[in-house]
Image (cartoon, rainbow, N blue to C red):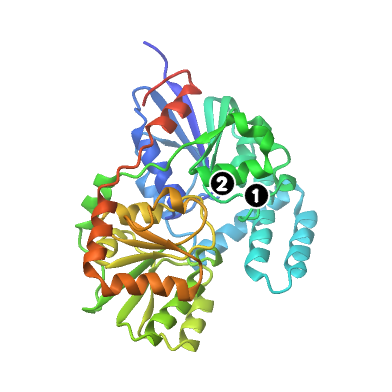
Amino acid sequence: MRSKKRILFVMNTMGRAGAERALVELMRLLDPARYSLYLYVLLPRGEMFGEVPDYVKLLNRKYDERSVLSPGGKLFIARRLAAAALRGGSARETLGRIVRAVRSGGKKKGRDSQTAEKLLRRMLADGTPALPGKFHLAAAYLEGPATWYVAEKVQANRKAAFLHVDYGRAGYTRELDRGCYGSFDRIFAVSEDVRKGFLSVYPEYAAKTGIFLNIINRAHIRRRAKEPGGFTDGYQGIRLLSVGRLYWQKGYDIAARTAQVLKKRGFSFRWYVLGEGEERKNLRKLIRELGLEDTFVLLGASSNPYPYFRQADICVCTSRFEGKSIVIEEAQALGRPVVAAACTGITEQIVSGQDGQITELDPEKLADEIGRLIRDPKLRAAYGQAAYEKEPAYEAGLADFLSLLGEQGA
């Protein structure tokens, strides 16, 4: 009997976010009769641990299934970073760079916080001990710590890296990477835009950079959407829904200003945001300033967001940048029309004017398209039906990934 190939996946956290959900679906596709699957998480906390298939061996001795975004989660991460800094011996240098980065950018607070975060994550990768043993294939499933760690501290016959975000806009640099991508046999981007963005920084890796679309289990999403849950406020009007962590990247400040424009134009609606994160305090202040307390609602996170998708009339994405939004594909799986701001990967997900609408990241422009859909239920239904019938294909990317083992199928 042929021995099973050992595949390791390395992740930054297992919080309830798009890349983590896509990783779980990928692991579910891999036959445990053919592969021995392993997972190692550098910051071992997050709700998605509970959804990892039972045949995947977790290499973390301890992990926590609670949220990384809660106060306890933030303390957990701070302690891990401090321990990694002490082990890695780079704390003083890295913290000095963080202070300089935050001071240097003036009013660009969002970008400054990204730079500081990336420097802290570099410290995490440097200070995390190497894994023992050797694997046939090691996959860094996210940029940053997971990628640096696999490149520098994992022994494997072949290595693959995954890109889920607009590389440059997310704050990654060649300086932070320290040549890590030279260690990988294959680099997979979740969209063509992500691939192009990465190659604008690393043109020398064009030959080994390909596409691996996120794996979306539409049948699973549709089943879970029928479970109990969803809105409980009894509102009977038009519901707008945005889903994702409360981060600067997601542009919820722009969403709130778009809601203000719609309200001034006389539209009746309620806009809900499903997610949690560091921007909650700032958003609550902005909501009060704009007089949107009864219009723009922060719901917090949910273990099952899909009933909310099913019950919403329009889904809205106001991200400043993405890689390829899993939220959009989840909304499409449930037949929801989407209005999205133009950013990385969006044109590969929405055919504007056919199954949704893409516009500028501007409150007036977003309000134009949302208002058009509010006024036209037939157009909403047409967009939703076209979205429901889409069938994203991931087979080519999976075959490319498995070819690193000399195989062609799952």
Residue at which label 1 appears? 124
Residue at which label 2 appears? 42
The residue carrying pointer 2 sits among few (fewer than 14), some (14 to 19) or many (20 or more) residues within 10 Å by Cα, namely many
Give whichever of discs 1 and 2 has the lower sequence position. Answer: 2
Of the residues shown, which amino acid type is indicated by label 2?
Leu
Residue 282: % across, % down: 54, 78
Q: Is residue 251 left or right of residue 358?
A: right
Image height of 31 relative to 302, above or below: above
| Cα distance in 3D space between marks 1 and 2 | 8 Å
Nearest the viewer among 343 and 163 is 343
Question: How many numbered discs sit on the rendered protein?
Answer: 2
Name the residue located 69 percent from the left edge and 55 percent from the top edge: 119
Residue 270: % across, % down: 32, 78
Q: Is residue 334 left or right of residue 56?
A: left
Nearest the viewer among 385 and 280 is 385
Name the residue located 50 percent from the left edge and 88 percent from the top edge: 289
Residue 175: % across, % down: 75, 46
Of the residues shown, which amino acid type is indicated by label 1?
Leu
In the picture, the disc for residue 311 is none
**Contact check, label 1 and label 2, Cβ < 8 Å:** yes
Q: Quadrant of the N terminus?
A: top left
Callout 2: SS: loop
